[in-house]
Image: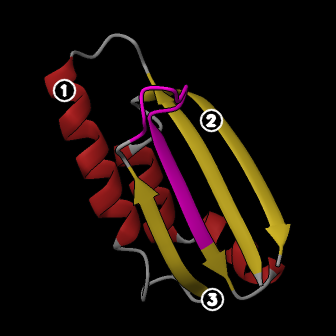
Amino acid sequence: MVRHVILWRLKETFDDGEKKKIVEDMKANLEALVGVVPGLISLDVNIKPLASSNADVMLDSLLENEEALKGYQIHPEHVKAADGYVRPYTDVRMCMDFER
């Protein structure tokens, strides 16, 4: 199994109300990929970081294997969610993929 973890920081140009809507939309659209993308076992988006955090959103997903991760990255529904609900609003992205 492969764990795929992403941390994002939102752009500073958004006010608190905008940030709340953005992260809720990110969560809803990314979590909806489970059952749609082959090999994606689970996906959880955390949008409630503690004050000690320096990221706004964390994606924690589990995929069957590295091939499933490669398929996930180019799957049209993932690309649609990333292009529509993530990339326009974030300025920092960190990723770690590892086998479990």
Quarter of image, res 40: bottom right
Distance in Å between CA atoms under marks 2 and 3: 23 Å
Q: Was residue 54 drawn as part of the magenta stretch in this picture?
A: yes
Q: Which mark is residue 37?
A: none
Q: Amino acid at mark 1?
A: Glu
Residue 44 shown left or right of residue 23 in the figure: right
Mark 3 and mark 1 lie on one chain; the one further toward the N terminus is 1
Figure quadrant of the N terminus: bottom right
Residue at point 67% right, 81% down?
Answer: 63
Q: Residues within 10 Å of mark 2 (few under 14, many from 20)?
A: some
Query: Regarding mark 3 in the picture, which secondary structure is present there?
Result: loop
Distance in Å between CA atoms under marks 3 and 1: 33 Å
Residue at point 63% right, 77% down?
Answer: 62
Q: Residue 9 at x, y = what percent?
A: 50, 28
Q: Residues within 10 Å of mark 1 (few under 14, many from 20)?
A: few
Look at mark 1 in the image and give the residue it sits on: 18
Look at mark 2 in the image and give the residue it sits on: 93
Residue at point 56% right, 86% down?
Answer: 41
Query: Regarding mark 1 in the picture, which secondary structure is present there?
Result: helix
| Total marks placed | 3
What is the span of residues highlighted in magenta in the rendered image?
A: 49-61
Q: Which mark is residue 39?
A: 3
Figure check: 53 above or below 64: above
Figure quadrant of the C terminus: bottom right
Residue, far top: 13
Q: Amino acid at mark 3?
A: Gly
Q: Residue 24 at x, y = what percent?
A: 24, 49
Residue at point 46% right, 51% down?
Answer: 82
